[in-house]
Image (cartoon, rainbow, N blue to C red):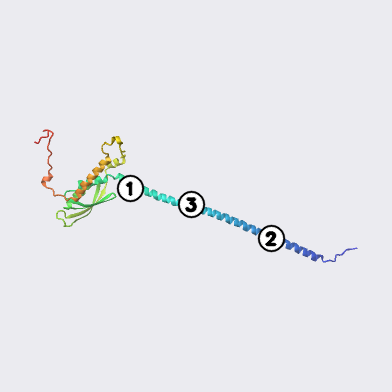
């Protein structure tokens, strides 16, 4: 005898498949939500890690900026020290130049001229003064150019002011300074002399002390030559008196 199923098995089968589909869809949705949460958590971790690296790099950059600022300050201090060192070396090299310059000013100025002012700026000197004539100014320029401590002299001005009857001409000179080669070699090879001990306290004066005395004497002579008006030369003054010989007669007057 044949068996015939008259129940609605197709409807039940369709419902079962729908239930399975919705269960699979729910599982996929839950898996997607979990995947998104995991991805967000991973990105947050990467962002936090990158922020920490950025903070570390900013701290290191700040430290480097502080070091660079200190290095710049040290370079400025070094430049200032080098500038002081150069000034000291220049003063050391030119320590005897002013003494010789004042000495040469006394030797080169003629009797018919007088200085009213001088100014030194580096390796040049400006001279202002008055003279009896332009010939006196020309003679003074020749004397300056023949000096070992002064070089070429440029005439800046010369004019007749008609103010002083004895010295009516006012002049100005620009003089280039120079140094003899022998003096430069002596300064280059100069070594400082150490002070003597207590047992040698009565030793003769050192060259530095002698140089300071000579400097004061030269400055005094130069100041007198600059400020004192020159006297008119007389025929009697041109002829120097002959020194009396005392060696042959034992010191007795002839």
For label 2, the residue is: 30
Q: Nearer the viewer, residue 64 or 124?
A: 64
Question: Which mark is nearer the camera, 3 or 1?
Answer: 3
Name the residue: 41% across, 49% down: 75
Q: Position of residue 101 (x, y in %)?
A: 24, 46
Report whether 67 appears left or right of 137. right
In depth, the one of 217 and 141 nearer the eye is 217
Q: Secondary structure at mark 2?
A: helix
Label 1 sits on a secondary structure element that is helix
Spatial CA span between label 3 and label 1: 36 Å
Near mark 1 (Cα within 10 A), the count class, few <14, some 14-19 or many ≥20, is few
Quadrant into which the C terminus falls: top left
Asked whether residue 81 appears in the rendered view, the answer is yes
Tell me residue 82's x, y (percent). Answer: 37, 47
- Percent across and percent down for residue 107 are 20, 46
Q: Residue at x 23, y 45 (%)?
A: 216
Q: Circle 3 sits on which residue?
A: 63
Residue 146 seen in render:
no
Question: Where does label 1 land, which residue?
Answer: 87
Q: Residues within 10 Å of mark 2 (few under 14, many from 20)?
A: few
Tell which tag, 2 or 3, sits nearer the viewer. 3
Q: Nearer the viewer, residue 73 or 142?
A: 73
With 105 as the anchor, is 4 left or right in this view? right
Q: Mark 2 or 3 closer to N-term?
A: 2
For numbered disc 3, what is the local secondary structure?
Answer: helix
Does residue 35 appear to the left or right of 160 in the view shown?
A: right
The image quarter containing residue 187 is top left
């Amino acid at each position: 005898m044949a068996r015939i199923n008259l129940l609605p098995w197709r409807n039940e089968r369709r419902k079962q498949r729908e239930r399975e589909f919705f269960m699979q869809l729910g599982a996929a949705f839950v898996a997607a939500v979990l995947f998104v949460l995991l991805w967000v958590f991973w990105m947050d971790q990467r962002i936090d890690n990158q922020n920490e690296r950025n903070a570390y790099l900013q701290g290191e950059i700040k430290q480097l900026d502080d070091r660079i600022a200190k290095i710049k300050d040290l370079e400025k201090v070094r430049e200032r020290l080098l500038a002081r060192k150069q000034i000291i070396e220049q003063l050391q090299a030119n320590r005897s130049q002013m003494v010789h310059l004042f000495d040469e000013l006394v030797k080169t100025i003629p009797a018919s001229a007088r200085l009213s002012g001088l100014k030194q700026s580096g390796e040049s000197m400006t001279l202002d003064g008055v003279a009896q004539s332009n010939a006196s100014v020309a003679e003074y320029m020749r004397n300056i150019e023949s000096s070992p401590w002064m070089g070429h002299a440029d005439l800046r001005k010369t004019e007749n002011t008609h103010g002083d009857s004895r010295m009516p001409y006012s002049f100005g000179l620009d003089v280039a300074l120079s140094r003899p080669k022998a003096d430069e070699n002596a300064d280059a090879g100069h070594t400082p002399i150490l002070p003597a001990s207590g047992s040698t306290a009565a030793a003769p004066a050192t060259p530095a002390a002698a140089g300071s005395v000579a400097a004061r004497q030269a400055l005094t002579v130069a100041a007198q030559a600059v400020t004192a008006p020159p006297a008119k030369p007389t025929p009697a003054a041109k002829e120097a008196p002959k020194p009396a010989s005392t060696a042959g007669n034992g010191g007795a007057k002839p």
